[in-house]
Amino acid sequence: MSPQKKSAQLNAVLVQLNGMTTGETIIDSLIELAYELSNPVAGWLIEENAQRDNEHE
C-alpha cells in the first residue's frame, strides 16, 4: 500500500477518534491502527521534505 493511501487512512482514523468520547470500546482499536499507520507515513513525509529541501538548494 502506498504511503499516500496510508496517510489518507491515518487522517480518516484520526478524524473518527476526534469525534469519539471516552469509554467507547472501538477507541483502543482505532488508536492501535493509527499507530500502525503512522510509522510508514512519518518516514514518507520525512523523505518528501528532504527531497524538497534538496530541490531548493
Image (tube, grey):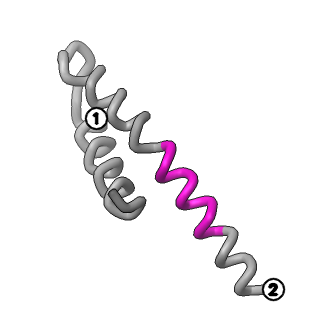
Badge 2 density bin: few <14, some 14–19, many ≥20, Cα 10 Å: few
Q: Is residue 24 left or right of residue 45?
A: left
Q: Residue at x 22, y 30 (%)?
A: 20
What is the secondary structure assignment of the residue under circle 1? helix
Labelled disc at residue 57: 2
Q: Is residue 7 above or below residue 39?
A: below
User: In the rendered image, which residue does mark 1 sit on?
Assistant: 17
Query: Residue 48: horizontal and vertical position, in percent?
Result: 59, 69
Q: Residue at x 33, y 51 (%)?
A: 11
Tell me the kind of residue under disc 2.
Glu
Q: Tell me which secondary structure the magenta stretch mostly adopts.
A: helix
Nearest the camera: 35 or 22? 35
Nearest the camera: 1 or 7? 1
Badge 1 density bin: few <14, some 14–19, many ≥20, Cα 10 Å: some
Q: Residue at x 33, y 57 (%)?
A: 1
- The answer to whether the residues at label 1 and label 2 have Cβ atoms under 8 Å apart is no
Query: Residue 21: horizontal and vertical position, in percent?
Result: 23, 23
| Distance CA(mark 1)–CA(mark 2) | 39 Å
**Could you tell which of marks 1 and 2 lies nearer the N-terminus?**
1
Q: Is residue 44 left or right of residue 4?
A: right
Count of labels in the image: 2
